[in-house]
Image (cartoon, rainbow, N blue to C red):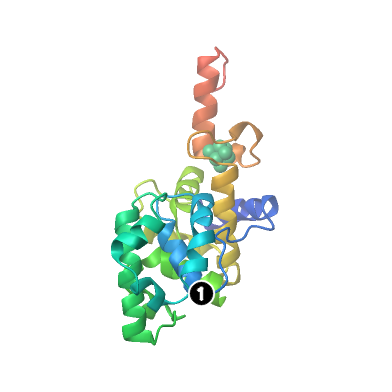
Amino acid sequence: MLSKKKALSMIDIIDEMFPDAECELIHDNPFELTIAVLLSAQCTDNTVNKVTKTLFQKYHTPEDYLAVSLEELQNDIRSIGLYRNKAKNIQKLCQSLIDKFNGEVPSQHEQLVSLAGVGQKTANVVMSVAFGEPALAVDTHVERVSKRLGICRWKDNVTEVERRLTSIIPKSRWTKSHHQLIFFGRYHCLAKKPKCDVCPLLPDCREGQKRYRASQRLSGGNAS
Ligand code: SF4
């Protein structure tokens, strides 16, 4: 695993590559963001944005989501993967918002994770994006990139990845780095075809070096 100093220097390069990275889920308030993050599990932000464009015109409050049948809500989000479970979770979330927080999305981590359907990642995204609280959510991109680079160990779970990243990155940069790592994973270090050949991190990246050596062997080169 990389030293913290080396790891931070890599985060700095990603910072330079994606200075304007930000949340790509379209929303107007903390409640809409929470619904969008909940819908985004195992689904692209683009797909979520297409659905929420009409969804957020129809539903404005937790009460609105509870005023329709589960089947109707499922139908409204059916183009999204896992829509049956997600519709159930949305209604459970709305009920707990009404029961515990007067229908408002809370800003504190402990309160957010107490809501039905809200886990660590969703809570961190809502805290940082909606309320400007420092938090570093670990999604599939953040986890993959951190492991490929050697910032974290392959065997680390998301909690360990979050702990490692927040021990390396200054707190004032957690939110920005979260978006930058997502952009890096989404547009550069892609899951299936990472752009190693044009990556400024290649010299120090364990995954990139492994792929480079494999490509050299395939092409009959003599990289060692
Ligand atoms: Fe990702 Fe390849 Fe860059 Fe490593 S060298 S960070 S695997 S794109």
| Quadrant of residue 94 within the rendered picture | bottom left
Residue at the outermost top position: 220
Residue 102 visible in this rendered orientation of the protein: yes
In the displayed structure, does residue 194 sit left or right of residue 62? right
| Quadrant of residue 187 within the rendered picture | top right
Question: Vertically, is 1 above or below 72?
Answer: above
Residue on which the image places disc 1? 30
Question: Vertically, is 23 above or below 200?
Answer: below
Residue at the outermost bottom position: 102
Residue type at mark 1: give it. Pro
Q: Position of residue 69 (x, y in %)?
A: 30, 67
Label 1 packing within 10 angstroms: few (<14), some (14-19), many (20+): some
Of the pair 59 and 93, the residue shown nearer to us: 59
Of the pair 32 and 142, the residue shown nearer to us: 32
Q: Quadrant of ligand 1?
A: top right
Residue 134 visible in this rendered orientation of the protein: no
Q: Position of residue 104 (x, y in %)?
A: 44, 82
Q: Is mark 1 within 8 Å of ligand 1?
A: no
Residue in the picture at 34% in, 61% down: 72
Please tell me how many numbered marks the rendered image carries.
Answer: 1
Q: Position of residue 198 (x, y in %)?
A: 66, 34
Residue in the picture at 51% in, 60% down: 54
| Quadrant of residue 196 within the rendered picture | top right
